Amino acid sequence: MRKRLLIVVLVLLPLSLMAQKQGNYVITFDDETSTPSEQPTYKPQPAPQQTVESDKEASGKRREDSGKKEKKSSGIFTGFSGGMMIHGGYLFSDDPRKVFSNSGLGSEEYVNSLPKRGFCYGIGGALRVHLLDHIHVGTEGFVSTMPLMGTGSKVRSGWGGACCDVYTTWGKVRPLIGMTIGGGSMSRLYVPKQAAVVVNTAADSTFYNAAYSKTPFFLIDPYIGIEIGLKSHDAVLIRIDYLLPFGKSGSKLTDNVKWSNFMSPTGPRLYVGVMFGKFNKK
């Protein structure tokens, strides 16, 4: 019996060594016959787990870290833009004397027949810096003309100042709201329909039945608008404002003048223009 068992062990030993290269298994023997059982039990070694997902997570973290570093370096200054705008609007006043800044226009009936409202047009531009992806800060200036009566009479305003607005981004659309604070001047030229020229030969002087005045002012100009991106370096700007000019102390208006005098005519204007520069793309 011992010899038979020894022979079986010597035969199976090389086979078991070869099988260990493929996978570990256990051979069970029957107690009664001391022979190997017909169905050995295999115990394969578990394969090492793949680390693809962990590699992806690590690379994602590296990209996030690099993105945060880039944001920190350029998070404040996010772009710049500048361009030109044309505008049209409708201005009005409650008294023709304020429109022409003249109290000697004639009889009350004639004064009441003079225009105190009308359309205006003009052009201007702006230069801005973009901060924190939500703020524009810069300067702007415009000239606006309101022709009257068809006689050459007109009211012309020129102004400029510092502008600041906040905006948000919805794809290619950027709605914004802001304000301009600055100063300017309003010139008024009054030419009547029947202009008269009086020559006083005795005094050697000539009088023209026309009037011209120029009034400086401080301004607050709130506005709302929308920018529509065309490409990464240009956008269409559409905005509406309402200029609020206040006469400075000593200005030549109809009555007693104070700094807080609200000047007219004034009203809403619609601006359309193209801005060029560097627009941050999300």
Image (tube, rainbow, N blue to C red):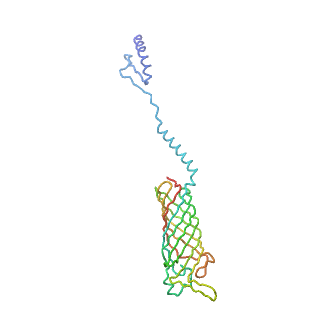
Q: Residue furthest top?
A: 3
| Viewer-nearest residue: 194 or 248 | 194
- Expressed as whole percent of the image width and height from the top left, the position of residue 193 reads 50, 82
- Expressed as whole percent of the image width and height from the top left, the position of residue 116 reads 50, 79
Q: Name the residue: 56% across, 48% down.
A: 70
Count of numbered tags = 0
Q: Is residue 223 above or below residue 281?
A: below
Q: Quadrant of residue 13?
A: top left
| Viewer-nearest residue: 152 or 49 | 152
Q: Residue furthest bottom?
A: 202
| Viewer-nearest residue: 69 or 2 | 69
Q: Name the residue: 54% across, 81% down.
A: 97
Q: Name the residue: 47% across, 31% down.
A: 48
| Viewer-nearest residue: 151 or 233 | 151
Q: Is residue 34 above or below residue 150?
A: above
Q: Is residue 52 above or below residue 101?
A: above
Q: Quadrant of residue 14?
A: top left
Q: Residue furthest left?
A: 38
- Expressed as whole percent of the image width and height from the top left, the position of residue 160 reads 58, 67
- Expressed as whole percent of the image width and height from the top left, the position of residue 177 reads 51, 64
Give the quarter of the figure containing the N terminus: top left
